[in-house]
Amino acid sequence: MVRRALIDPIRDAASEVRPALRIAVLVAMLAACGPAHLQHTAEVTSPIGTAQAAGAAEQAKLPPMVLGVQTHFSQGWTASTLAQAQQVGAPMLRDSLPWADTEKVRGSYSLNTPAAQALAAACAGGQRLLLTAVPTNPLYDGGGWVSSPAGNAAFAAYLAALADRFGPCLAAIEVGNEINGSGTLAYAAGTDRAAAYVATLKAVRARIGGRAAILGGSTNMIGTGFLKTLFAAGMLPTVDGIAVHPYRLRAEGLDVEMAQLNAAMDAAGKRVPIWVSEFSVDSRNQPLAAGELVKQATMLAASGAAQASWYALIDQRWFPNMGLYAGTSAKAQAGAYRLMQQLLARGRPQRLDLGDPLLFAYRFGADTTVVWGAPRALTVQGGEVRDARGAPAPTFGISESPLVITGTTAIRFGASTWIADTLMGWGTPQWRYAARLKADTSYRLPLFDDQFTSYFGDRWYRPLRINTTSAAPGGTAAAPIRAVWRYVAPGAQAIDIGGCFAKAAAGDGVDLTVTAAGKVLWRGVLTGQLQLPPLSASLAAGDAVELIAGPNQTAGGDSFNLRMILFKRGASEPVGCPD
C-alpha cells in the first residue's frame, strides 16, 4: 500500500426494443425470475424515459462479490482486532506472513507466530484469508526476486506450507504487491522481468494449483497497460485471477477502467476474475468516504469483480484517514461497509439505463436500488430510503452522495439542471477528447492504457492526458499539444458554464480557453486555483463547447485538477475543485 495523489453499460434484451415496449419486456423478464409481487418494482420512471436493467447478462450470473478488509497482523496488530472485523461482518481478511520472516532456515517454516495465530483464529471464526506473498528471501537468489529454478521452487514450497497451515480457509495468494511501482520485480540485471514473474507463477501453480486461487498482477491502480505486458508473457493461463488496487477519490470512471481491463484480457485470449485486493478513499471527510465506499463497491460488483478488500480495518500512522475504525471507534465508513454486506448478499447489481449519463442507478435483487448523480428531485412511493451509512434519510433528493432505496413500488426522478459534467460524464458520449497541435488540427484521443491508470491520450502525445478529475497538456508555446474537451449540443440549448481549476506551484502555468460555437468566452493562465467567471452561451444543434488546455510557454509542471459543468441557463452554481 502506498499513498496516492491521485461504456457505456452493455444493454440486455430489454434495451434493444422500442422505448414503448421496454417496460413490458422487463416486467416479463422479472416475472420469469421471481414471485409476482416483485413485478411492480420494475418500474422506474423519469422525464427522459423508462429505465431497464442494462447490465451484462454474464455479470448477473456471477456469485456475489466478496467484500473483505485489510488487516496487518503481520505488522504487529493484536488478535483483539479480530473482534472489530467481525463487528462489520468482514467475511475475508487480507494480510501477509512474509516469506523472509517465515523461512529463516532453508526448508523450515515458522508458522506459529502471533500473526499466524491471529489469522488461524480468524479461520476458526469463519473468515477466510487472502495472503500477499512477495517472492524475496535472503536465503535465495541473493535476496532479490527469485528467478532461478531453485528459488522458484523454494517460494512455491513456502506457499505450500501456508496452504498446509490454513487449509481451505486460504482463499487466495496474491503474488507480489503493486508490482508496477518502483522497487519491485527486483531481478538481476538483464532479466526479462515479465517472463521471470510468469515463470514464478508457473512454479507456484505446479506446486499448489487448486488449493488456493493464485493471483497475479497486483497493480497500484488498475494498471491495464502494465498488465498487458504480463498477458503477452503468458500470465493469464497460469493464474486464477488478477489483483488490482484502483485507488481514487471518486467512483466515476471506475466502470470504464474495469471494462477496459476485461477487454484487454479478452484480446489476450482469456478472461480471469478480477480481485480488487485494495481500494479505499484517503479523506478526512467521513461522510464523503462512506459514500464513496458504497459507490465504488457497487460499481466494482456490477463490473464483475470477484472480491474487493477495503484498506484498511483501522486507521494507521501513515494512513490516518482510511480505516473503518479510528482505534476502537467506528467511523462512518464502518456503517457503509456493513450496509454493503447487506446489499451484496442480494446478488450482482445491474445498472439501470435511465438515458442520462449523469444519473447512476444500480439495482440489487428485486427491490433495492443505489442511486446518485447530478442534483434533481426524487420521489419514492413506499419503501425505505437510507444514506450511505445505512441511516434513514428523512429528506432526500439525488446528489453526488448515494442513497439506498428498498422495497419501493415506484421511483421517479425529476429533471436536472446539469447538462454535462467533465467528472460524472467522463468516458461517456457526452464528451469527446482530442489533442490539438495547431489551431485547426485536432486528433481524437482514445482511452489509453498506461503503467498505472487509463486515460484519454496517446503514447505519441505524452505527457498529455485527460483523467476524470486531472489532466495535463504537452509541448511548449512553440509546439503546443493542447488537451481538448468537446461537448456537442444535440439541439438548441441555452447554457451557463461553471468550473474550478487548480494546480501546484510548478512550471509557468497552464493556458486555459473556453469556447462556444467557435467563439472565445474566456481565457486565462492557471497558476494556482481559479473559478471560471459567469459564462453563458446559446447553442444551436451541432454547436460545440470546448475546454482547451495548453502548456503556456514552457514544458513541465503542467498537471492540474479540473471540473467543468454545463448548466441550464439561469441554474449555474459554484463548482468545487476536485482534490
Image (tube, rainbow, N blue to C red):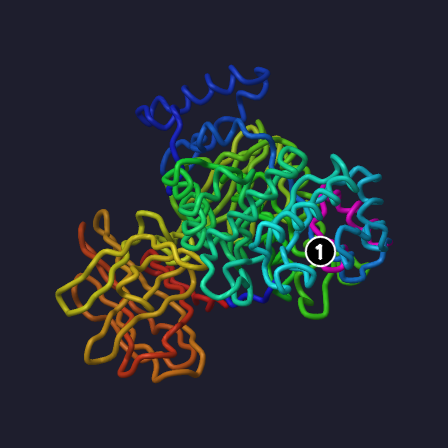
Q: Amino acid at mark 1?
A: Trp
Q: Position of residue 184 (x, y in %)?
A: 55, 63
**Mark 1 sits on what residue?**
99
Q: Position of residue 94 (x, y in %)?
A: 69, 49
For this view, does 494 lie left or right of residue 229?
A: left
Q: Quadrant of the N terminus?
A: bottom right
Q: Quadrant of residue 239?
A: top right
Q: In percent of the image, x 38 and y 78: which residue is there? A: 557
- Residue 444 part of the magenta segment: no
Q: Depth check: 478 or 136 in front?
A: 136
Q: Quadrant of residue 262?
A: top left
Q: Depth check: 440 or 569 in front?
A: 440
| Extent of the magenta region | 80-102
Q: Callout 1: 10 Å neighbours few (<14), some, many (20+)?
A: many
Q: Position of residue 521 (x, y in %)?
A: 23, 71
Against 308, residue 352 (above or below) is above
Q: Position of residue 297 (x, y in %)?
A: 58, 46
